[in-house]
Amino acid sequence: MIRFPPLIAIAAMLVSPPAAGQQYPVKPIRIVVPFAPGGPSDLLARTVGQKLTESWGQQVIIENRAGANGIVGCELVAKSPPDGYTLVMGTPGTHGINAALFPKLPYDTIRDFAPITRLGVSPYLLISHPSLPARSAREVIQLARARPGEIAWATGGSPTQLAAELFKRTAKIEVLIVPYKGQAPAVTAALSGEVSLVWGGVAQTLPQIKAGRLRALGVAGTQRSGVIPDVPTIAESGLPGFEAAGWYGLLAPGATPRAIVERLNTEVVQILRLPDVAQRLRGEAYEIPGETPDQFAAVIRAEVAKWEPIVKQSGIKPE
């Protein structure tokens, strides 16, 4: 004899996913930042977290869990209950490069996370010391071909080192890549003339650029920066399609109900469009994607595919 579930159980199954999204959140939310306080991930998480607290009436707690290129914090979230109350701030490093750099991650970059949306995108800026006789990315390429292996390029960690490798391989040039322990020391090396080139953030280096202590040569994004509109993209300067950027996005554990992911996405995208938030982020030279979970998921898949061959070809090892 076939037994059918009670009508009440059927009704509960039918309304459960939407109800999960409608009732969420009913308790405080934790956003794990897998890096030390004070960096871009931390600042963006706190900006959005404060607005979520105001909007939903539930406290949003920012927890810094630095360590192992972001792996410590990401593992914590990947293995947390998939209920929308523990989120992580991801970057190209944590959700792109690490998958290639570390052969035995304690989680699957794609399967174990549910992307929500990116909060901001900050394309790298190709910067030189004024003594370098090049005023564009195109001229850097020409100079490097004339002086193979002579131009020193400072990098401040795996993401910028791989971006420099990508530039080198795309342009088919030889430059001397010099790793520094952090982006700040790398920029300082360029300021002192110890190296000729460095990747830098627009907001962080704009004062030195305006003062003439550094020279902006190209934006490694899909469009020019609104803060320095006269500086062309690297794609405009001879490397079509070239893109290397820092981005910062929210993700939940992989099995989080779709209704909760979409509820978070809707709320966060609305926050990013608030005039005061948008003005603040654009003032810091961030682009605001405002994308769907599926669009963000596509970005992550593209990042993994993009950096894996660069890691293998360059032989870069974990720091």
Image (cartoon, rainbow, N blue to C red):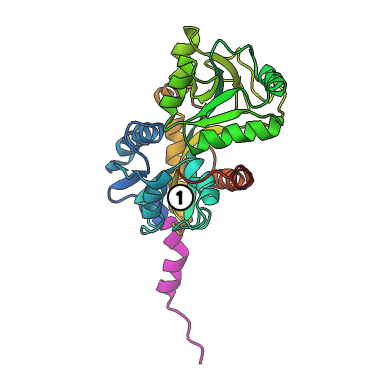
**The stretch drawn in magenta includes residue 51:** no
* Place of residue 282 in the rendered image (x, y in percent of width and height, measured from the top left): 47, 22
- Evaluate whether residue 274 shows in this view: no
- Evaluate whether residue 189 shows in this view: yes
- Of residues 306 and 77, the one drawn nearer to the viewer in this rendering: 306
- Of residues 32 and 146, the one drawn nearer to the viewer in this rendering: 146
Query: Which region shows up in magenta?
Result: 1-19
Magenta span dominant secondary structure: helix
Above-or-below relation of 226 to 308 = above
Q: Name the residue tied to disc 1.
A: 261
Q: Three-letter amino acid code at disc 1?
A: Val
Question: Going by the image, does 168 lie left or right of 64?
Answer: right
Q: Quadrant of residue 60?
A: top left
**The stretch drawn in magenta includes residue 14:** yes
Determine crowd level at label 1: few under 14, some 14-19, many 20+ residues with C-alpha closer than 10 A.
Answer: many
Which residue does the image show at 58% across and 47% down from the upper left? 304
Question: Going by the image, does 214 lie left or right of 72?
Answer: right
* Place of residue 10 in the rendered image (x, y in percent of width and height, measured from the top left): 45, 72
